[in-house]
Amino acid sequence: MECREIEWLIDAYLDRTLSRRVAGELVAHLESCAACRKTYEPMLRLLSSPEPVAVPVGLRERIAAALSEATLAPAQGRQRPETAADAGRRTRRVAMPWAGAIAASVAFFVMGWLGSRWWVNRPTRLHPFDPGREHPPAKVVLSPWAMSNLAQAIASQTPASPIALVAQTATSEWLVESLFRPPPAPPARAATEPAAPAVEPDAEPALLILPPVIRL
Amino acid sequence: MPKSHDNLTDADLVRAVGSGDRDAYAALVDRHLPGVHAVAMRITCDAAAAQDIAQDVFVRAYERLYLYDGSHPFRNWLLKIATNLSLNHLRSRQRERILHLRAAEAREDSADDRREAPDIPGPQEWKHWLGQLDETQRTVIVLFHFHEMPYTEIADVLDMPLNTVRTHLHRARRRLRELMTAGSMRENGKWNVAR
Protein backbone atom coordinates (compact mmCIF):
# COMPACT_ATOMS: atom_id res chain seq x y z
CA MET A 1 0.00 0.00 0.00
CA GLU A 2 1.32 3.42 -0.93
CA CYS A 3 1.06 6.65 1.02
CA ARG A 4 -1.12 8.38 -1.59
CA GLU A 5 -3.77 5.68 -1.21
CA ILE A 6 -4.19 6.34 2.50
CA GLU A 7 -6.13 9.57 2.12
CA TRP A 8 -8.73 7.80 -0.01
CA LEU A 9 -9.02 4.86 2.34
CA ILE A 10 -9.03 6.69 5.64
CA ASP A 11 -12.66 7.85 5.29
CA ALA A 12 -13.84 4.35 4.52
CA TYR A 13 -11.77 3.06 7.44
CA LEU A 14 -13.43 5.53 9.80
CA ASP A 15 -16.83 4.62 8.35
CA ARG A 16 -16.02 0.95 9.05
CA THR A 17 -16.80 0.08 5.45
CA LEU A 18 -13.37 -1.27 4.58
CA SER A 19 -12.96 -5.00 4.27
CA ARG A 20 -11.01 -6.69 7.04
CA ARG A 21 -8.11 -7.37 4.68
CA VAL A 22 -7.78 -3.78 3.42
CA ALA A 23 -8.23 -2.38 6.93
CA GLY A 24 -5.41 -4.65 8.08
CA GLU A 25 -3.18 -3.41 5.28
CA LEU A 26 -4.02 0.19 6.18
CA VAL A 27 -3.16 -0.30 9.84
CA ALA A 28 0.05 -2.11 8.89
CA HIS A 29 1.04 0.75 6.64
CA LEU A 30 0.33 3.33 9.37
CA GLU A 31 2.50 1.33 11.75
CA SER A 32 5.38 1.10 9.31
CA CYS A 33 5.27 4.57 7.71
CA ALA A 34 6.35 7.38 10.02
CA ALA A 35 5.09 10.17 7.75
CA CYS A 36 1.58 8.74 7.46
CA ARG A 37 1.51 7.96 11.14
CA LYS A 38 2.39 11.55 11.94
CA THR A 39 -0.31 12.77 9.59
CA TYR A 40 -3.20 10.55 10.55
CA GLU A 41 -2.57 9.19 14.03
CA PRO A 42 -3.62 12.29 16.01
CA MET A 43 -6.95 12.45 14.21
CA LEU A 44 -7.52 8.72 14.54
CA ARG A 45 -6.75 8.83 18.24
CA LEU A 46 -9.12 11.74 18.76
CA LEU A 47 -11.97 10.16 16.84
CA SER A 48 -11.59 6.60 18.03
CA SER A 49 -11.21 7.16 21.75
CA PRO A 50 -13.11 10.23 22.86
CA GLU A 51 -12.76 11.23 26.43
CA PRO A 52 -15.97 10.47 28.32
CA VAL A 53 -17.88 13.48 29.52
CA ALA A 54 -18.83 13.08 33.16
CA VAL A 55 -22.30 14.07 34.27
CA PRO A 56 -21.93 16.94 36.74
CA VAL A 57 -22.92 16.30 40.31
CA GLY A 58 -26.42 17.55 41.03
CA LEU A 59 -27.63 17.58 37.43
CA ARG A 60 -29.92 14.58 37.96
CA GLU A 61 -31.56 16.23 40.95
CA ARG A 62 -31.92 19.46 39.02
CA ILE A 63 -33.67 17.65 36.17
CA ALA A 64 -35.91 15.78 38.61
CA ALA A 65 -36.95 19.07 40.19
CA ALA A 66 -37.66 20.59 36.77
CA LEU A 67 -39.71 17.54 35.77
CA SER A 68 -41.85 17.80 38.88
CA GLU A 69 -42.97 21.22 37.68
CA ALA A 70 -43.41 20.15 34.07
CA THR A 71 -46.81 19.69 32.53
CA LEU A 72 -47.53 16.01 32.85
CA ALA A 73 -50.89 15.86 31.17
CA PRO A 74 -49.82 14.99 27.62
CA ALA A 75 -47.52 12.25 28.84
CA GLN A 76 -50.10 10.55 31.07
CA GLY A 77 -51.77 8.42 28.46
CA ARG A 78 -53.62 11.20 26.75
CA GLN A 79 -52.87 11.70 23.12
CA ARG A 80 -53.00 15.04 21.47
CA PRO A 81 -56.60 15.68 20.39
CA GLU A 82 -57.05 15.51 16.67
CA THR A 83 -57.93 18.83 15.16
CA ALA A 84 -59.97 19.52 12.05
CA ALA A 85 -56.77 20.40 10.21
CA ASP A 86 -55.28 16.99 11.10
CA ALA A 87 -58.38 15.20 9.82
CA GLY A 88 -58.28 17.20 6.60
CA ARG A 89 -54.62 16.40 6.06
CA ARG A 90 -55.24 12.70 6.68
CA THR A 91 -58.19 12.62 4.27
CA ARG A 92 -56.30 14.49 1.58
CA ARG A 93 -53.32 12.19 1.93
CA VAL A 94 -55.48 9.16 1.18
CA ALA A 95 -57.99 10.48 -1.31
CA MET A 96 -56.14 13.02 -3.37
CA PRO A 97 -54.01 10.84 -5.64
CA TRP A 98 -57.00 8.84 -6.89
CA ALA A 99 -59.32 11.83 -7.02
CA GLY A 100 -56.84 13.82 -9.07
CA ALA A 101 -56.22 11.00 -11.53
CA ILE A 102 -59.91 10.26 -11.98
CA ALA A 103 -60.88 13.92 -12.37
CA ALA A 104 -58.12 14.54 -14.91
CA SER A 105 -59.05 11.40 -16.83
CA VAL A 106 -62.75 12.35 -17.00
CA ALA A 107 -61.93 15.92 -17.98
CA PHE A 108 -59.61 14.85 -20.79
CA PHE A 109 -62.13 12.26 -22.01
CA VAL A 110 -64.92 14.85 -22.19
CA MET A 111 -62.60 17.33 -23.92
CA GLY A 112 -61.61 14.73 -26.51
CA TRP A 113 -65.19 13.70 -27.10
CA LEU A 114 -66.47 17.24 -27.51
CA GLY A 115 -63.49 18.17 -29.64
CA SER A 116 -64.04 15.28 -32.00
CA ARG A 117 -67.76 16.05 -32.30
CA TRP A 118 -67.01 19.69 -33.02
CA TRP A 119 -64.44 18.77 -35.64
CA VAL A 120 -66.90 16.51 -37.46
CA ASN A 121 -69.77 18.98 -37.35
CA ARG A 122 -67.83 22.11 -38.01
CA PRO A 123 -69.03 24.19 -40.96
CA THR A 124 -66.77 24.05 -43.97
CA ARG A 125 -66.74 25.71 -47.33
CA LEU A 126 -68.34 22.73 -48.98
CA HIS A 127 -70.67 22.06 -46.09
CA PRO A 128 -71.76 25.28 -44.42
CA PHE A 129 -73.57 25.19 -41.10
CA ASP A 130 -76.61 22.88 -41.31
CA PRO A 131 -78.02 21.49 -38.05
CA GLY A 132 -79.99 18.75 -39.81
CA ARG A 133 -77.12 17.49 -41.93
CA GLU A 134 -76.03 13.88 -41.53
CA HIS A 135 -72.31 13.42 -41.31
CA PRO A 136 -70.12 10.48 -42.07
CA PRO A 137 -68.51 8.64 -39.13
CA ALA A 138 -66.10 10.76 -37.20
CA LYS A 139 -62.52 10.97 -38.31
CA VAL A 140 -61.18 11.49 -34.84
CA VAL A 141 -58.70 14.27 -34.37
CA LEU A 142 -57.40 12.94 -31.09
CA SER A 143 -59.23 9.97 -29.72
CA PRO A 144 -60.93 10.43 -26.35
CA TRP A 145 -59.27 7.19 -25.33
CA ALA A 146 -55.90 8.59 -26.22
CA MET A 147 -56.57 11.72 -24.19
CA SER A 148 -57.85 9.67 -21.27
CA ASN A 149 -54.76 7.49 -21.29
CA LEU A 150 -52.59 10.57 -21.62
CA ALA A 151 -54.34 12.11 -18.61
CA GLN A 152 -53.73 8.99 -16.57
CA ALA A 153 -50.07 9.01 -17.52
CA ILE A 154 -49.76 12.66 -16.51
CA ALA A 155 -51.71 12.23 -13.26
CA SER A 156 -49.68 9.20 -12.22
CA GLN A 157 -46.55 11.40 -12.44
CA THR A 158 -44.53 8.64 -14.07
CA PRO A 159 -42.66 8.91 -17.34
CA ALA A 160 -45.10 7.77 -20.02
CA SER A 161 -43.65 5.54 -22.70
CA PRO A 162 -45.04 6.52 -26.14
CA ILE A 163 -45.16 2.88 -27.21
CA ALA A 164 -47.16 1.87 -24.14
CA LEU A 165 -49.47 4.84 -24.62
CA VAL A 166 -50.18 4.00 -28.27
CA ALA A 167 -50.63 0.32 -27.48
CA GLN A 168 -53.02 1.08 -24.64
CA THR A 169 -55.01 3.47 -26.80
CA ALA A 170 -55.23 1.02 -29.71
CA THR A 171 -56.36 -1.73 -27.37
CA SER A 172 -59.03 0.49 -25.84
CA GLU A 173 -60.38 1.51 -29.21
CA TRP A 174 -60.37 -2.03 -30.52
CA LEU A 175 -62.28 -3.23 -27.45
CA VAL A 176 -64.88 -0.48 -27.76
CA GLU A 177 -65.20 -1.06 -31.49
CA SER A 178 -65.68 -4.80 -31.10
CA LEU A 179 -68.02 -4.59 -28.12
CA PHE A 180 -70.30 -1.72 -29.01
CA ARG A 181 -70.36 -1.55 -32.79
CA PRO A 182 -73.72 -2.86 -34.10
CA PRO A 183 -73.49 -5.74 -36.57
CA PRO A 184 -73.88 -4.68 -40.20
CA ALA A 185 -77.36 -5.20 -41.59
CA PRO A 186 -77.55 -7.86 -44.32
CA PRO A 187 -77.90 -6.20 -47.69
CA ALA A 188 -81.25 -6.61 -49.36
CA ARG A 189 -80.66 -7.91 -52.85
CA ALA A 190 -82.57 -9.71 -55.53
CA ALA A 191 -82.21 -13.45 -55.98
CA THR A 192 -80.62 -13.03 -59.40
CA GLU A 193 -78.23 -10.42 -58.24
CA PRO A 194 -74.64 -11.67 -57.92
CA ALA A 195 -73.23 -12.06 -54.47
CA ALA A 196 -72.17 -8.83 -52.85
CA PRO A 197 -68.50 -8.33 -52.07
CA ALA A 198 -67.52 -9.36 -48.59
CA VAL A 199 -66.44 -5.85 -47.68
CA GLU A 200 -68.40 -2.79 -48.62
CA PRO A 201 -66.13 -0.43 -50.56
CA ASP A 202 -67.15 2.65 -48.55
CA ALA A 203 -67.08 0.94 -45.16
CA GLU A 204 -64.71 2.25 -42.56
CA PRO A 205 -61.61 0.05 -42.53
CA ALA A 206 -61.37 -2.02 -39.38
CA LEU A 207 -58.36 -1.69 -37.14
CA LEU A 208 -55.77 -4.23 -38.18
CA ILE A 209 -55.00 -6.58 -35.31
CA LEU A 210 -51.97 -8.74 -35.88
CA PRO A 211 -52.19 -12.12 -34.16
CA PRO A 212 -49.11 -13.07 -32.18
CA VAL A 213 -46.67 -15.29 -34.04
CA ILE A 214 -45.50 -18.29 -32.13
CA ARG A 215 -42.16 -19.57 -33.32
CA LEU A 216 -41.44 -23.14 -32.44
CA MET B 1 -33.21 3.76 38.82
CA PRO B 2 -35.81 1.47 40.34
CA LYS B 3 -34.97 -2.21 40.07
CA SER B 4 -38.24 -3.00 38.32
CA HIS B 5 -37.23 -0.85 35.35
CA ASP B 6 -33.76 -2.26 34.82
CA ASN B 7 -34.74 -4.91 32.32
CA LEU B 8 -37.29 -2.91 30.39
CA THR B 9 -36.53 -1.54 26.94
CA ASP B 10 -36.91 2.11 26.09
CA ALA B 11 -40.14 1.37 24.22
CA ASP B 12 -41.58 -0.35 27.30
CA LEU B 13 -40.59 2.58 29.50
CA VAL B 14 -42.14 5.08 27.10
CA ARG B 15 -45.39 3.11 27.16
CA ALA B 16 -45.23 3.03 30.95
CA VAL B 17 -44.77 6.80 31.05
CA GLY B 18 -47.78 7.14 28.77
CA SER B 19 -49.84 5.20 31.27
CA GLY B 20 -48.79 7.48 34.11
CA ASP B 21 -45.70 5.79 35.54
CA ARG B 22 -43.42 8.67 36.51
CA ASP B 23 -40.69 6.36 37.78
CA ALA B 24 -40.38 5.02 34.24
CA TYR B 25 -39.42 8.46 33.01
CA ALA B 26 -36.89 8.78 35.84
CA ALA B 27 -35.41 5.51 34.58
CA LEU B 28 -35.21 6.93 31.05
CA VAL B 29 -33.47 10.03 32.40
CA ASP B 30 -30.94 7.91 34.27
CA ARG B 31 -30.30 5.81 31.19
CA HIS B 32 -29.83 8.61 28.67
CA LEU B 33 -28.56 11.57 30.68
CA PRO B 34 -24.85 10.80 30.03
CA GLY B 35 -25.37 10.70 26.26
CA VAL B 36 -27.58 13.77 26.11
CA HIS B 37 -25.23 15.78 28.32
CA ALA B 38 -22.18 14.66 26.34
CA VAL B 39 -23.75 15.71 23.03
CA ALA B 40 -24.62 19.13 24.42
CA MET B 41 -21.17 19.49 25.97
CA ARG B 42 -19.30 18.47 22.83
CA ILE B 43 -21.32 20.67 20.50
CA THR B 44 -21.42 23.76 22.67
CA CYS B 45 -18.02 23.27 24.40
CA ASP B 46 -19.67 25.06 27.32
CA ALA B 47 -20.24 23.23 30.61
CA ALA B 48 -22.93 25.55 31.95
CA ALA B 49 -24.83 25.58 28.67
CA ALA B 50 -24.62 21.80 28.42
CA GLN B 51 -26.31 21.42 31.81
CA ASP B 52 -29.09 23.82 30.84
CA ILE B 53 -29.58 22.03 27.55
CA ALA B 54 -29.65 18.58 29.16
CA GLN B 55 -32.34 19.75 31.58
CA ASP B 56 -34.30 21.36 28.77
CA VAL B 57 -34.09 18.20 26.65
CA PHE B 58 -35.68 15.99 29.28
CA VAL B 59 -38.37 18.49 30.21
CA ARG B 60 -39.32 19.05 26.57
CA ALA B 61 -39.30 15.35 25.80
CA TYR B 62 -41.58 14.71 28.77
CA GLU B 63 -44.01 17.42 27.78
CA ARG B 64 -44.08 16.33 24.15
CA LEU B 65 -43.87 12.60 24.52
CA TYR B 66 -46.94 12.23 22.33
CA LEU B 67 -44.79 13.39 19.40
CA TYR B 68 -42.50 10.37 19.74
CA ASP B 69 -43.82 7.82 17.27
CA GLY B 70 -41.46 4.95 17.98
CA SER B 71 -40.11 4.81 14.43
CA HIS B 72 -36.61 5.67 15.68
CA PRO B 73 -34.81 4.66 18.87
CA PHE B 74 -35.79 6.83 21.84
CA ARG B 75 -32.12 7.62 22.42
CA ASN B 76 -31.82 9.12 18.95
CA TRP B 77 -34.97 11.15 19.49
CA LEU B 78 -33.42 12.64 22.64
CA LEU B 79 -30.12 13.26 20.87
CA LYS B 80 -31.98 15.01 18.09
CA ILE B 81 -33.58 17.38 20.60
CA ALA B 82 -30.21 17.89 22.30
CA THR B 83 -28.50 18.62 18.98
CA ASN B 84 -31.11 21.14 17.91
CA LEU B 85 -31.02 22.92 21.26
CA SER B 86 -27.23 23.00 21.18
CA LEU B 87 -27.19 24.46 17.68
CA ASN B 88 -29.78 27.02 18.70
CA HIS B 89 -27.58 27.94 21.64
CA LEU B 90 -24.58 28.36 19.38
CA ARG B 91 -26.48 30.53 16.95
CA SER B 92 -27.99 32.69 19.65
CA ARG B 93 -24.57 33.39 21.14
CA GLN B 94 -22.95 33.82 17.73
CA ARG B 95 -20.47 31.25 18.80
CA GLU B 96 -19.44 30.49 15.28
CA ARG B 97 -18.24 34.02 14.70
CA ILE B 98 -16.30 33.98 17.96
CA LEU B 99 -14.68 30.69 17.10
CA HIS B 100 -13.67 31.95 13.68
CA LEU B 101 -12.14 35.00 15.30
CA ARG B 102 -10.25 32.78 17.71
CA ALA B 103 -9.03 30.62 14.86
CA ALA B 104 -7.92 33.70 12.94
CA GLU B 105 -6.09 34.98 15.98
CA ALA B 106 -4.47 31.60 16.43
CA ARG B 107 -3.25 31.65 12.84
CA GLU B 108 -1.72 35.07 13.39
CA ASP B 109 -0.02 34.01 16.57
CA SER B 110 3.71 33.76 16.73
CA ALA B 111 5.61 30.52 16.49
CA ASP B 112 6.24 30.69 20.22
CA ASP B 113 2.54 30.45 20.89
CA ARG B 114 2.27 27.51 18.56
CA ARG B 115 4.98 25.70 20.40
CA GLU B 116 2.55 25.51 23.32
CA ALA B 117 0.32 23.19 21.33
CA PRO B 118 0.81 19.54 22.28
CA ASP B 119 3.08 17.53 20.01
CA ILE B 120 0.54 14.79 19.43
CA PRO B 121 -2.81 15.93 20.74
CA GLY B 122 -4.59 13.27 22.67
CA PRO B 123 -8.28 12.68 23.21
CA GLN B 124 -8.28 15.03 26.18
CA GLU B 125 -7.86 18.00 23.83
CA TRP B 126 -11.12 17.32 21.98
CA LYS B 127 -12.56 20.66 23.08
CA HIS B 128 -9.58 22.50 21.60
CA TRP B 129 -9.78 20.74 18.24
CA LEU B 130 -13.54 20.52 17.86
CA GLY B 131 -13.81 24.17 18.81
CA GLN B 132 -12.02 25.07 15.60
CA LEU B 133 -14.59 23.36 13.38
CA ASP B 134 -17.74 25.09 12.30
CA GLU B 135 -20.93 24.05 14.04
CA THR B 136 -22.17 21.63 11.37
CA GLN B 137 -18.83 19.88 11.00
CA ARG B 138 -18.52 19.61 14.77
CA THR B 139 -22.04 18.23 15.08
CA VAL B 140 -21.53 15.48 12.49
CA ILE B 141 -18.21 14.50 14.06
CA VAL B 142 -19.79 14.34 17.53
CA LEU B 143 -22.85 12.39 16.45
CA PHE B 144 -21.06 9.95 14.15
CA HIS B 145 -17.82 9.25 16.00
CA PHE B 146 -18.62 9.96 19.62
CA HIS B 147 -22.23 8.75 19.74
CA GLU B 148 -22.22 6.21 16.91
CA MET B 149 -25.28 7.62 15.21
CA PRO B 150 -25.72 6.32 11.65
CA TYR B 151 -25.73 8.60 8.63
CA THR B 152 -29.48 8.31 8.17
CA GLU B 153 -30.19 9.45 11.71
CA ILE B 154 -27.76 12.35 11.41
CA ALA B 155 -29.44 13.39 8.17
CA ASP B 156 -32.76 13.30 9.99
CA VAL B 157 -31.44 15.28 12.97
CA LEU B 158 -29.82 17.98 10.84
CA ASP B 159 -32.58 17.93 8.22
CA MET B 160 -30.18 17.59 5.31
CA PRO B 161 -29.64 14.98 2.57
CA LEU B 162 -27.55 11.92 3.31
CA ASN B 163 -24.80 12.87 0.87
CA THR B 164 -24.55 16.32 2.43
CA VAL B 165 -23.88 14.64 5.77
CA ARG B 166 -21.14 12.57 4.12
CA THR B 167 -19.63 15.72 2.63
CA HIS B 168 -19.65 17.55 5.96
CA LEU B 169 -18.07 14.58 7.70
CA HIS B 170 -15.37 14.23 5.05
CA ARG B 171 -14.52 17.94 5.24
CA ALA B 172 -14.56 17.88 9.03
CA ARG B 173 -12.07 14.99 9.12
CA ARG B 174 -9.82 16.68 6.60
CA ARG B 175 -9.96 19.92 8.55
CA LEU B 176 -9.18 18.12 11.79
CA ARG B 177 -6.28 16.33 10.16
CA GLU B 178 -4.86 19.56 8.83
CA LEU B 179 -5.24 21.33 12.16
CA MET B 180 -3.73 18.52 14.19
CA THR B 181 -0.92 17.88 11.75
CA ALA B 182 -0.04 21.56 11.62
CA GLY B 183 -0.05 21.61 15.41
CA SER B 184 2.34 18.72 15.69
CA MET B 185 4.77 19.20 12.80
CA ARG B 186 7.33 21.91 13.03
CA GLU B 187 10.65 21.22 11.53
CA ASN B 188 13.60 23.54 10.92
CA GLY B 189 11.65 26.62 11.92
CA LYS B 190 8.82 26.24 9.45
CA TRP B 191 5.52 24.46 9.47
CA ASN B 192 5.00 21.52 7.17
CA VAL B 193 1.54 20.20 6.71
CA ALA B 194 1.90 16.65 5.52
CA ARG B 195 -0.38 15.69 2.63
Image (cartoon, coloured by chain):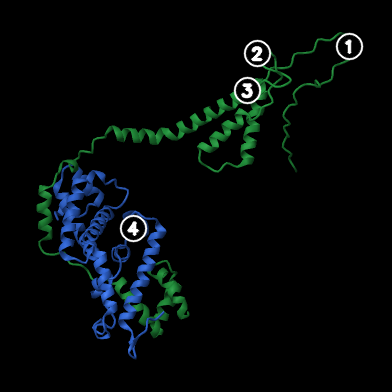
Chain colours: A green, B blue
Task: Find residue A131 and name its label.
Answer: 2
Q: Chain of mark 1?
A: A
Q: Which residue is label 1 attached to?
A: A193
| Percent coordinates x, y for residue B108 in the rendering | 28, 79
| Percent coordinates x, y for residue B136 in the rendering | 31, 62
Q: Secondary structure at mark 4?
A: helix
Cα distance in 3D space between marks 3 and 4? 60 Å
Q: Secondary structure at mark 2?
A: loop
Q: Which residue is label 4 attached to?
A: B154
Residue A157 against residue B78 in the figure, above or below:
above
Depth check, front residue: B70 or A101: A101
Disc 4 crowd, CA 10 A, few/some/many (<14, 14-19, 20+): many
Q: Are marks 4 and 1 on the same chain?
A: no
Disc 2 crowd, CA 10 A, few/some/many (<14, 14-19, 20+): few
Q: Which residue is label 3 attached to?
A: A118
Q: Nearer the viewer, mark 2 or mark 4?
A: 2
Q: Are marks 3 and 1 on the same chain?
A: yes
Q: Chain of mark 3?
A: A
Q: Amino acid at mark 3?
A: Trp
Q: Secondary structure at mark 3?
A: helix
Task: Find residue A102 and name its label.
Answer: none
Mark 1 vs 2, N-terminal side:
2
C-beta proximity under 8 Å, tags 1 and 2: no
Q: Amino acid at mark 4?
A: Ile
Disc 3 crowd, CA 10 A, few/some/many (<14, 14-19, 20+): few
Q: Amino acid at mark 2?
A: Pro
Q: Nearer the viewer, mark 3 or mark 1?
A: 3
